[in-house]
Structures are given as C-alpha cells and as structure tokens.
Amino acid sequence: MPLDPTLIAEFKQKLLDEKSRLQAELVLMAKATGAENHYETRIENIGTDPDENATEVESYVDNLALESNLENQLKEVNRALAKIEQGTYGICEKTGQEISMERLKAYPAARTAI
C-alpha cells in the first residue's frame, strides 16, 4: 500500500529539517567545495608553538572523520528527497518491497527494509 500524500509531506519536511541541520553542522567545521554534498574541513592557523600545533592537528583529524560522517548522512537525506520527487520513496532498494512505516518514522532516509 503506497504512502499517502500527507505522510509523504511529513517525511519530506523531516528530511528537509535534517538536511538543514546537517548543513549547519558542516559549515561549523568545513567549507562547501561547490560539489554537491562535499565539504572541505578547515584547519586552524598553525602557529609556532608545537603544543598548540598538536592540538590543532588533532582537532583537524577529528573534524575530518566527523565531516565524512555528516556528508554521508547528507547524501542519504538528499537521496531520500530525490526518491520523493521520483515517486519511489518508501520502496526497498534491494527487494522492491515497501519499507515499514515504523522504519521510516525512525529513519526517514532509509533505503532498505529490515
């Protein structure tokens, strides 16, 4: 049974809200490169104090991992939004079956059924 338009609108709004949240988090540590869903982590100015440099490099490495995670989440959200536009939202990519309502409520960007 396909999702009704009201539910699709609710999921779309949740996805748009999540997209905004992810983009806001990414901007705190990285700059957009111009490529879709791709950001580049910024490194703070490295000074002359080795201790400060070590802290800045450690922070940069941590931010790289976080940036990658946030970018992947953003890709999933954008993929789900595209599926809404294509009329294929809520369909498992592996089985072609409907993804359960519970799963979509828990994770609106779900691509597969459990």
Image (cartoon, grey):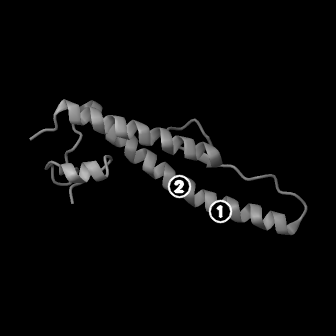
* Rendered image: mark on residue 61: 1
Q: In terms of secondary structure, where does tag 1 sit?
A: helix
Compared with 61, 112 (above or below) is above
Q: Amino acid at mark 2?
A: Ser
The residue drawn where x is 63% and y is 46% is 28
The residue drawn where x is 86% and y is 68% is 50
The residue drawn where x is 49% and y is 42% is 21
| Quarter of the figure with residue 82 | top left
Q: Is residue 69 left or right of residue 28?
A: left
Q: Position of residue 10 (x, y in %)?
A: 29, 36
**Neighbour class for label 1 at 10 Å: few (<14), some, many (≥20)?**
some
Considering every residue shown, the one lying at the far left of the view is 1
Q: In terms of secondary structure, where does tag 2 sit?
A: helix
Q: Position of residue 83 (x, y in %)?
A: 28, 37
Q: Amino acid at mark 1?
A: Val
Compared with 39, 50 (above or below) is below
Say which label, 2 or 1, has the lower sequence index: 1
In this rendered view, identify the residue nearer to me: 103 or 46.
Answer: 103
Query: Where is mark 2, residue-wise?
Result: 68
Confirm whether residue 8 shows in the render: yes
Q: Position of residue 1 (x, y in %)?
A: 8, 41
In this rendered view, identify the residue nearer to me: 83 or 13.
Answer: 13
The residue drawn where x is 24% and y is 40% is 89
Q: Is residue 9 left or right of residue 39?
A: left
Q: CA distance from mark 2 to mark 1?
A: 11 Å
